[in-house]
Amino acid sequence: MTPPATGYRALVAEHLRRPDRPSGVAEVIPDVGDRLAYNPCVVRQGTRTLLAVRVESPDSYWRDAASWDPQIRFYERTAGGWRPAPGTPVFTAAEDPFAAWVRGRDGEPVLVFGVVSLDFRHDPPRVVTRFHAAPDVERLDPADPFVEVPDMKDIRLLQRPDGLAICGRPQGGTAGRGRVSLIMADDYTELSAELVAKAHVFHDQVAEDTKLGVNELYDLGDRIGVLGHIAVGEEGGPQEYAGACWTIDPAARTTTTPRVIVMRSDFPPAPPKRADLTDVVFPGSMEPLDGDLVRIHCGLSDASLGSIVMPSPFPTP
């Protein structure tokens, strides 16, 4: 008999028992005034490190079109900290950025940049993930997505030698509160809502009450490394999110159980956007450092940013 899948509480408890839990630090994003900055995504472009950040008003609420005002802005790492990146676009009515360098049909590298938006013609508002492509950040056009995928967040891409891996997060039906899916494509131009809908869904990775999603993907050779999140709770009550990692075997269509690697309590205290989001950490990107260490950039309580340095969850063999 197959043992029951592990739930959020057990996975978090295992992390809390670790004697070597790392401690994170707050990251300061300048020139946002009284707006909140959170849920970052790293874009490595040549020798530069850029950070795409969700910036919005404290009272911005996704069910209220009049208040909802998120933007995605780009910042660049300098010796003095993060600074606005000159010549970069601003994405309006956009949340939770993600990025991947992929191979174009001509063999040249292409930056695929994604954001989540809302369609207020529906009640409740309909989630729409929009994908943009350009040779670099500066040439991204917020008004010109090459494809839109409705009704799904947490879609991520990974260029592999054998093609493009696409992970989604279907919800409802056998996918329950949210599961991870995988499908391969020849290149990024094949990405579509119809393609993502055909993906293989990993149903039994976590317990039924636990939601999970992908934040960034890494090529580990015969496997795909996943930086993601697991969560419990519903809107209107406390919501809890933790950062986790696992691996996917794309050939066998199997996956490992998530391991929690970062929680909100691993960072300094800071006010949440709302009280029900106090225990939320949303990992955005994992930045490789020397010595098989990584820096993980996270959104904290839908209100601020932090980073945390730890041994790589996918160490080099």
Image (tube, rainbow, N blue to C red):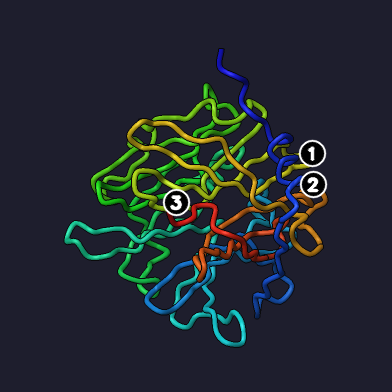
Mark sitting earlier along the chain (2/1): 1
Count neighbours of disc 3 (C-alpha within 10 A) and say few if under 14, some if 14 to 19, many if 20 or more. many
Tell me how far mark 2 sits from mark 1, CA to CA.
Answer: 6 Å
Q: Secondary structure at mark 2?
A: helix
Left or right: 109 as drawn, with respect to 216: left
Which quadrant does the N terminus fall into?
top right
Q: Secondary structure at mark 3?
A: strand
Q: Residue at x 39, y 50 (%)?
A: 220
Image location of residue 105, percent across then percent down: 19, 56
Nearer the camera: disc 1 or disc 3: 3
Mark sitting earlier along the chain (1/3): 3
Left or right: 245 as drawn, with respect to 263: left
Tell me how far mark 1 sits from mark 3, CA to CA.
Answer: 30 Å
Label 2 close to label 1 by CB (< 8 Å):
yes
Tell me how far mark 2 sits from mark 3, CA to CA.
Answer: 29 Å
Q: Residue at x 64, y 29 (%)?
A: 6
Residue occupied by mark 2: 276
Q: Secondary structure at mark 1?
A: loop
Nearer the camera: disc 2 or disc 3: 3
Image location of residue 177, percent across then percent down: 60, 31
Image location of residue 208, percent across then percent down: 63, 25
Q: Which mark is residue 217?
A: 3
Count neighbours of disc 1 (C-alpha within 10 A) and say few if under 14, some if 14 to 19, many if 20 or more. few
165 to 306, vertically: above or below: above
- Residue that extends furthest to the bottom in the rendered view of this protein: 79
Q: Residue at x 78, y 64 (%)?
A: 268
At label 2, the amino acid type is Asp
Residue occupied by mark 1: 237
Mark sitting earlier along the chain (2/3): 3
At label 3, the amino acid type is Leu
Residue 208 visible in rendering: yes
